[in-house]
Image (tube, grey):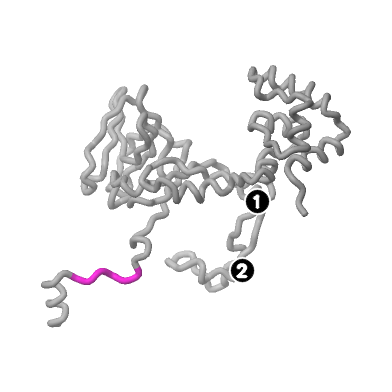
Amino acid sequence: MESSPGDYLKRVRERLGVGVREVQEASVTVAREKGNANFYIAASRLAQIENEASQPSIHKLFTLCAVYGLEFHDVLRRYGIEVNELAGYAARLLPEATRPVSGEVYGLDARVTIPVRLDPSFRWETTQLINRMVAQWGEVPAAFLTGANPRRHTYAYVGMEDRTMYPLLRPGSLLMVDAERRRIGREPWKDEFDRPIYFVELRDGYRCAWCQAEGSRLLLISHPHSGTPIKTVNLEKDADVVGQVVGVAMRLVAAGKTTPEPAPGPLKQAATAK
């Protein structure tokens, strides 16, 4: 039977050979340096956390992890809080809101399934369904992938009611945003597919759009087919460019739609006549 979080913390303390008074004294240092009394843990409060069904606040949990040398997200998991589930809930809750989505993977023991060996007949120059060409899938620690990334990206979600860049970026799209590309470029572009798209944080939410900087003004330019008007904001006070969109994953067919819609009457009749 798995022990309670309080019992786990007690066993960790006893294994370290630390008394409750010593934890209390150590917490004084944390609270003083953080300038917040919530980080302080009295010996009596620690006894409650260890021996009763009493949950510590996030401040006191931080202090315990600091004193015991524990991984914060692992202790959260013991209290039933799985931080890696946040992205899944974020994709389902408030789907109409455009907002950033965390791409972080927490916990050194978290694992990610990736293709580790492709079929020898796989041809990189042609378009293929990768799933059918994977000879072997495998799990690797997420920390390996994180350490191998030369650049940290932010992931964003386009709300179901946000048609600013439609049809180039459809509502419900998942975006990869390069946070190092925050300067609005003036380089020439050939067409709408080549024109940089930026993800911008505003006072009232987020906007994904083409951008044009004119002094302190920032023009958020929507796709001409979207029906969304151009928005002008103060670049210094009302907007923060999160980064440039460098990748996108989006549906081309609405979720749940498995067959094409029937053609309108005249078109359907013409097709039948053929």
Q: Quadrant of residue 128?
A: bottom left
- Residue 129 higher or lower than 57, as above or below: below
**Left or right, 52 with reference to 259:** right
Residue that appears at 57% across and 72% down: 120
Percent across and percent down for residue 249 are 42, 54
- Neighbour tally class for label 2: few under 14, some 14-19, many 20 plus, Cα within 10 Å: few
Quadrant the C terminus occupies:
bottom left
Q: Which residues are magenta?
A: 258-263
Going from the N terminus, do you reach mark 1 or mark 2 first?
1
Q: Nearer the viewer, mark 1 or mark 2?
A: 1
Percent across and percent down for residue 101 are 47, 43
The span from disc 1 to disc 2 (Cα, nearest Å) is: 20 Å
Please give the label number shown on residue 21: none
Residue that appears at 30% across and 23% down: 215
Percent across and percent down for residue 178 are 46, 41
The three-letter amino acid code for the residue at tag 1 is: Ala
Residue that appears at 34% across and 38% down: 207
In this figure, which residue is indicated by the disc labeled 2? 136
Residue that appears at 22% across and 38% down: 229
Q: Nearer the viewer, residue 215 or 72?
A: 72
**Left or right, 148 with reference to 271:** right
Most extreme residue toward the front, as rendered?
52
In this figure, which residue is indicated by the disc labeled 1? 110
What main secondary structure does the magenta stretch of the protein show?
A: loop
The answer to whether residue 224 shows anywhere in this view is yes
- Residue 168 higher or lower than 59, as above or below: below
The answer to whether residue 147 shows anywhere in this view is no
Percent across and percent down for residue 272 are 16, 81
- Residue 236 higher or lower than 156, as above or below: above
**Left or right, 179 with reference to 35:** left
Q: Nearer the viewer, residue 47 or 222?
A: 47
Q: Dot 2 lies on which element?
A: strand
